[in-house]
Amino acid sequence: MNPGFNADNVLTIRLSAGGRFQTSQQSAAFLEQVLEHIRALPEVKAAGSIHFLPLSGLLSATGFWRDDRPQPQPGDQSTTQTFVITQGYFAAMGIPLLSGRTFDTRDRDDAPLVTIVNQELANRFFPGENPVGKRLHIMWGRPQATYEIIGIVGSIRHVGMEKPAEPALFLPNLQAPEVGARLVIRTARDPTRLAAPVKGAIRALDRDIPVSEVRTMQEYVARSVAQPRFNMILFAVFAGLALALATLGLFGVISYWVAQRTQEIGIRRALGADDGRVVALVLKQGMLVAIAGVALGLAGAFALTRLLDAMLFSIEPTDMPTFVTVATGLVAVTLVACYVPARRAARVDPIVALRYE
């Protein structure tokens, strides 16, 4: 399942600068210095920051509306996921720029306010339009201000791998600074080997600043899919056991049903039916029962797909290969269960078959 970003070779670090600076602008300026030092390290391909990492279980949201539309009543504004980032964040995360530009040194506190939206927000709130150059009222820090949309980026699964992408907008850290920051560093090799040099670059600016939660982005991805994957495995185990029991039961019942017809088979053979006709008749009748049962089972399974949706991961509840495989398997079991005893009974002497009880 594609999260919308590239988690390979990405190191993340939590930087806590709260209380160490008198103003949020000083904190934002320090963060920019930290990132400049990190980008200068060998094998660092890109570096940026965001105040809430994807798949971390944390997010923020705010109300907004289009500047070319009437202001909605309080409580009626649309809401969207909102994230404060620095330049370099999209490159570090491997999130593609689809239109316009990303944040750069032009987007400072004294510059016109700007924002970047994801593809989901653009599709939902600007259908058939190019939102680049349009303006939004965003209820974030400066509720009366408007922000110009300067770019569109790809949508990502921020909440969880099993959750769809939601509309989101991004604000530059220099215009909407946040106290906390999660550094995101894309490296040319194993990111864990650069943890120490990155910490050293941070401590070169401030030896006492708290640095914690040193993890790779792949760890966040793995943690996000752990519970859904466990649920899927557990569901698959019980489903497999149920299928095995159903297969054994079906084989036993069909075999018994055919064996009970041994006398009938003897009579048919005594009246001139050859082995092939007898076996074909039994198979035909058995297949009619199997096909009817499979049809009813598939109808019931499709009716219950909504209940299965929460228990499946990266598989659609109406996954056709799964339905076809199970249905084919059950029909094959019925075929074998009919053929073996029917063939055996057809080879028995008619006189012996007539005496069978």
Image: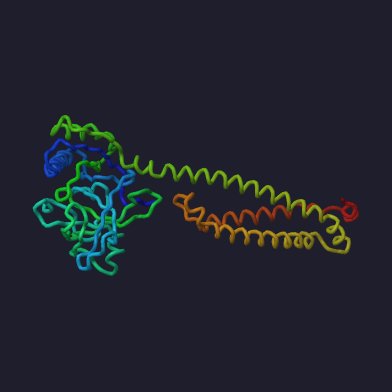
Q: Along the line of sight, which residue is nearer the eye, 258 or 234?
A: 234
How many numbered tags mark residues here?
A: 0
Residue drawn at (29%, 57%) of the image: 79
Report x, y in % for residue 104: 14, 52
In the rendered structure, the answer to whether residue 142 lies left or right of residue 302 reads left
Classify residue 153 as left or right of residue 315: left
Q: Position of residue 42 (x, y in %)?
A: 19, 38
Outermost residue on the front side: it is 74
Q: How is the image coloured?
A: rainbow
Question: Residue at 41% across / 44% down in the picture?
Answer: 225
In this rendering, position of residue 328 left or right of residue 346:
left
Task: Find residue 152 and report its image quarter.
Answer: bottom left
Residue at 10% in and 55% down = 111
Is residue 260 or residue 271 the one in the foreground? 260
Residue most toward the bottom?
128
Q: Determine the image quadrant of residue 116.
A: bottom left
**Image location of residue 290, percent across then percent down:** 68, 59
At 89% from the left and 55% from the top, the residue drawn is: 354
Residue 163 to residue 33: above or below: below
Report the front residue among 176 and 329: 176
Farthest top residue in view: 207
Residue 194 lies, in percent from the top left, at: 24, 35
